[in-house]
Image (cartoon, rainbow, N blue to C red):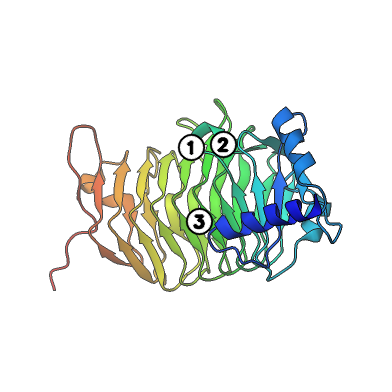
Amino acid sequence: MLENQLSRYGAVSKVLEGVSPYSKAFFVGDSDDTGFVDFVNEFAPDREGVVRVYSSMFDSTMLANTRAGRGDVILVMPGHSESISTDQSFNVKGLKVIGLGEGDERPIVRYTATAASISLDTGGIQLENFRLIADTSAVTIGVDAVGSGSVVRKNSLEFNGNGSDFAIGIRAITGDRMFIDDNEILGEDTIGPTHGIQISASDYTRVRRNYITGQFSNAGISDTAASQGLLIGDNFVNNQDTAASITIAGTTTSKGLVYNNRLATADSTAGGLSAITAGGFRWNQNYVTDGDSVSGVLAPVVSSS
């Protein structure tokens, strides 16, 4: 029985991309799910006596059993759902937290208070493939990526009915070389969050292939603290805030390349060209549209030099 369990744990490490043979895999599912109970029976504690199966992805005992730099992974089962009301911190270097399943079957985390958040507080932590749902108004931050090399990928940040939303969907702050890729940020149509993705003093960070829609009082994507070497590309940003409607914004000291983004704005000033704050970025092949049934124009205007 023990050898069978060990071979199963080893098999998990072999099939996961970027997981080494020395990594430990932990599993999270709903304790009232009959199938998951059967799964628990198959995956008893390993030969070191470490329990590998839990009912919460934030379980303190599970997180205490992970080890920095070993490349451990937490796999959360399809259909799993849990709620948080305070900040939940992942602070083990190199930890991967991955939701299994596709579409609506992805695991769900519900935010039931404004202080609820998921924080990636040290280097190289990955959060992938979750539905993160605001169940109350003005949740301060959905995902707060602090550690250098953090990866936030393939998540969907959503609101649950009128009046619920994230003030900031994803924030990349102070840590460098982060990857914010392939996420959805689906904001409320009538309640205005401030940022879809906010970057702040995060050098060489990449923001790519995200779909962002809602009414953002600041911007869909913005750098607010002079980040250097940013790469912002292939994003779809729809800001329907009629007061500001900025899609992508930088400061005068922001540096990096903004390329191939498709932008929509509710602001028709200057044919929609006011929907960006160019700052110190270099811009290449970005198009913005300011209304229905009209094609986009290059933004900012083509350089004459």
Percent position of residue 78, x then y: 60, 37
- The residue carrying mark 1 is 187
CA neighbours of label 3 inside 10 A, class few (<14), some (14 to 19), many (20+): many
- The residue carrying mark 3 is 198
Label 1–label 2 contact, CB within 8 A: yes
Percent position of residue 73, x then y: 66, 57
CA neighbours of label 2 inside 10 A, class few (<14), some (14 to 19), many (20+): many
Against 73, is 141 above or below?
above
**Residue drawn at (71%, 64%), measured in percent from left and top?**
92
Percent position of residue 146, x then y: 62, 63
Q: What residue type is labelled 2?
A: Asp
The foreground one among 210 and 51 is 51
In primary-sequence order, the first of circles 3 and 1 is 1
Query: In this image, 105 relative to 110: left or right?
Result: left
Disc 1, SS:
loop
Against 205, is 143 above or below?
above
Query: In this image, 164 relative to 69: left or right?
Result: left
CA gap between label 1 and label 2 equals: 6 Å
Q: What residue type is labelled 3?
A: Gln
Label 3–label 1 contact, CB within 8 A: no
CA gap between label 2 and label 3 equals: 15 Å
- The residue carrying mark 2 is 165
Disc 2, SS:
loop
